[in-house]
Amino acid sequence: MPPSNTNLLQGTLDVLILKVLALQPMHGLGISNRIAQVTSNTFLVKPGSLFPALHRMEEAGWLTSSWGESENNRRAKFYRLTAAGRRQLKQETDLWARIAAAMARVLEVS
Amino acid sequence: MPFWPRLNTLWRNLTGRQRVEADLADEIRSYRELLEDEKVRDGADPVTARREALIELGGAEKLKEEVRDIRRGSAFDALGTELRQSLRGLRRNPSLTVLGTTMLALGMGASIVVFSIFQSVLLKPSPFRDVNRLLTIWETRLDRGVDQATFSEANFWDVRSYNHSFTEVAAYHYAEANLTGLGPAEKVIASEVSAGFFRTLGVSPVLGRDFSYDDDRNGFRNPLLILGNKFWKTRFGSDPSILGKTLRLNDRAYVVIGVLPPGEPWIDDQLYMPFGYRPDADRDSWEFQVIGRLKPGVTQEAAQADLARIAEWLAPSFPKEDKGIGFFFTPSSTWVASDTTRRALRVLLGAVTFLLLIACLNIANLLLARGTARMREIAVRTALGASRARLIRFVMMESLLLNGLGVVAGLLIAYLGLGAIQSLEIRDIPRLADAGLNPWVLGFAAFIALLTGVLSGLAPALQAPASGIAAALRDGDRQASSRGQGRLRNILVTGEVALSFLLLVGAGLLIRSFSHLMTVDRGFHTENRLMFAVNMPGPYWEKSVGKQFLDRFFDRLNANPQVLAFGAINQRPLEGGDPGMGIDTPQSPAKPPWAGWRVVTPGYFAAVGLPLVRGRLFDENDKPVWIPKDVLPYPRRVIISDRLAKQIFPNEDPIGKQVILWKGQSGVPAQVVGVVGDSRERGLAENPTLTVYLPYGTNALTTEFVVHTSGNPLALVPTIRSLVAALDPNLPISDVRSFEQVVNRSVAPQRLNAILLSIFSVLALALATTGIYGVLSYSITRRTAEIGLRVALGATRSNILGMTIRQGLRPALIGVFLGALGAFWLSRYLVTLLFGVKPFDAVTYVAVAVLLLATAALACYIPGRRAMRTDPATALRIE
């Protein structure tokens, strides 16, 4: 059973957001929805975590934002990856791959 | 993390606060609305959907607060972390920090002092309006060898009336007066100015009114006064009710009508009274400083031609006084500082720049050394994701921090140093007193801190590894990376040594020059001589009041056992004015030599120690050469200086011979009764002067006294004061100094230059030596293994020592060579500041080279000894 309130590490949330935005620009609600969907509800991102993360990554220069119209014609703030953000995503992806591989090896040995 | 976007957001956060807040509120609201929509789509009713959305949101205000925290945090966060890291790095390395800060503090302190003086003296704008239209006008008598003289009163009025090129011409006559009624009698400077003087300068009173052109209708000297601003501040506490008050000067009552604004120091602390036109104005006595303001559009050449036209009319109209008259201008910039002073200041500025450069090079060296030691740390940082830009920023920040500390300490040093210099009271640079740590100077300090921070951080910053991380992590490659870096450090050392050579040569030349100046034969003797002035007001110059005072005063001095000799003169040597005359034999057809004339009492020569070369000194029977109209003419007697005697009487004994005084002007015959030794009366740097000495008397009074004392001359001052007061309580004595003090004041600029440049060069030497030591010491440590190998293969200890010293001396030698070249090329700029020393003085160059190489060798010796003691076994094991 998936935990409903998983404590997400800050770095992990960053990767999730970056990955989601790699496909297309989205607004805040869309991002948290997509994360929930793609991870089969393992990670449920609350606004309390989402907003600080989005703004922090925007300050860092990994995202840019602009106001636009949502699917049902509401005004919403859309976030998009920058070139630096893409680079960051690639770095983090590689890092995660290495960690995952290492963990897998460790856990297999018993 | 990219730097500029972060700076952008920081700026945005700081300035568009309201817009950003509104934007955030909008975003949160939009999120809620979208969430509501979603719930409604999933089947909830609007009210429930709204409530659930609000719950999920968790409170908009809390959200905003969290975002704000993030925002504030991230903006400063990275900068703050880096700052903290740099500080920690500096604290962990106290020797680097202390050494670096000290070097920078000294270098910056020196720069700040020099810049402060430079700014106050040369850069600060003049308080006068449109200064480049303001000129000083001088009379000339080129046919008599006079190329710059003050005006006579009548000539001034004529030039003023008949010129077409000046909007206003005004005159200034320096005068002193005794101020009584405000406490004890005091001598003040109470100059006479023409009514348009302040208008010509372009200043108008801040209180009261200026002199009007009508003021001279009430006679030649109207009893009105305008006060200088500093005078008003110090003596009347800036009291505005001073207007209309009466002051007693020389026993006459004057009414204060105005106060000037603050201005240049030499106009600030005195009083001004008007003098008006009178038809019988003197044309013979050159006493007035004349200034003029050019009309708009009139060039100096046009004005020159205009005045030449007036000269052509004056000369035949007044053949006795104005024969050969001409006019000539000097710009008002010379009021602030003479050309020599400007040159000296520029030299000092150059010197201090070199010093600062050396400090920078040293800091760079230090940071490079540390950078190499931290190679591994840097490599790990890079592996963990620090970008190259971030590493560069990190190293720069260290350098900037060091420089920040250095500049703060430097400001303290500058404050103390400036105070010390100002206490010297150098007369040649009146604006020196105004130099201080004003906003301009502080801005300069910040600027050089930034500049040196960037410069000294540049070398180690560029050395942060770009690609060789793996190499850096491997021990074995320490050699390879350090060799290129070693060369860089050697280049830095060479630069330091070269710059030090320049500074040392400069200092050496100035020191030798100054010592020549002080040991040159002065002609007079200056030890144990007291000098003071007694300002005698008008009544003293009538009948024989003044002479009686002098004679009574001399009697009392004679009775004092501490007085060995005494005399008086009308112009104090070195500090007083220099009235002159043409003097020659009656029959000589040549242009008469120009000599300074002085009125002296018979005891003066003994008092200053001028030897009698021929003939006799004055006695009581010698009377003044100005014979009053109601007295029977008597033979005039004069004494001349040795050089003058040789010039006028080249092959004969001058005693008893006739000369014409003021030859070419009034022409007065006199007989030479004595020849005295020469003296450098116009300044130690000048040639011995041509001087004519005239006897004193009832109409030729002497106000500057010289007393040769048996002990400390200044100890006699209270006695002198009471002696004078007993004769006349309203007569103050002023300008009390020992002759030695007078001499020292006259050479204060040269002394200051020599001292400052010496300090700079000693600092430079210390820095360069530290640099050499540091580089060599580090290199030895790196080469421990190699040295161990050499020893194991048979090298003796002295071989190692020799190798080390040779290695260390090589950059020093190159530096000395380059420095010598540079000094040779730059020394031409020093020529005007030198006395008795040529700029390419072999002794100085050799001495400096020896000094530099010796200290370099010493700096190499210590690490050399360490290398010498390397034990091959342990050395080879260290890796």
Image (cartoon, rainbow, N blue to C red):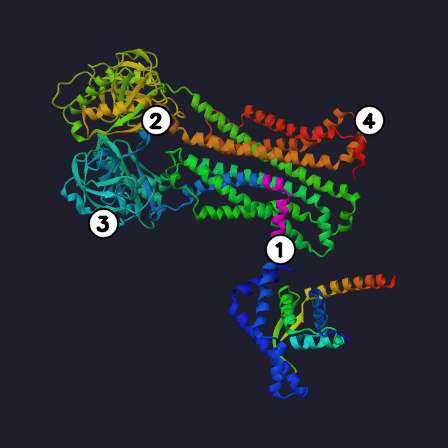
> Are dots 1 and 4 on a single chain?
yes
Q: Which amino acid is tagged 1? A: Thr
Pointer 2: what residue?
B574
The quadrant in which residue A92 appears is: bottom right
- Nearer to us of marks 4 and 3 is 4
**Three-letter code, disc 4:** Gly
Instruction: Tell which tag, 2 or 4, sits nearer the viewer.
Output: 4
Name the residue tied to disc 3. B208
Earlier along the polypeptide chain: callout 4 or callout 3? Answer: 3
Q: Nearer the viewer, mark 1 or mark 3?
A: 1
Label 1: few (<14), some (14–19) or many (≥20) C-alpha neighbours in 10 Å: few
For residue B89: magenta? yes
Q: Secondary structure at mark 3?
A: strand
Question: What range of the chain is rendered magenta?
Answer: B80-99
Badge 3: few (under 14), some or many (20 or more) residues near its Cα, within 10 Å?
Answer: some
Q: Which residue is mark 1?
A: B81
| Residue B843 falls left or right of residue B618 | right
Q: Earlier in the sequence, mark 2 or mark 4?
A: 2
Q: Does residue B168 appear anywhere in the picture?
A: no
Q: CA distance from mark 2 to mark 1?
A: 64 Å
Instruction: Indicate which label's residue lies in the foreground, 2 or 1.
Output: 1
Q: Is residue B778 left or right of residue B16?
A: right
Q: Residues within 10 Å of mark 2 (few under 14, many from 20)?
A: some
Q: CA distance from mark 1 to mark 4?
A: 52 Å
Foreground residue among B706 and B717: B717
Residue B409 belongs to magenta span:
no
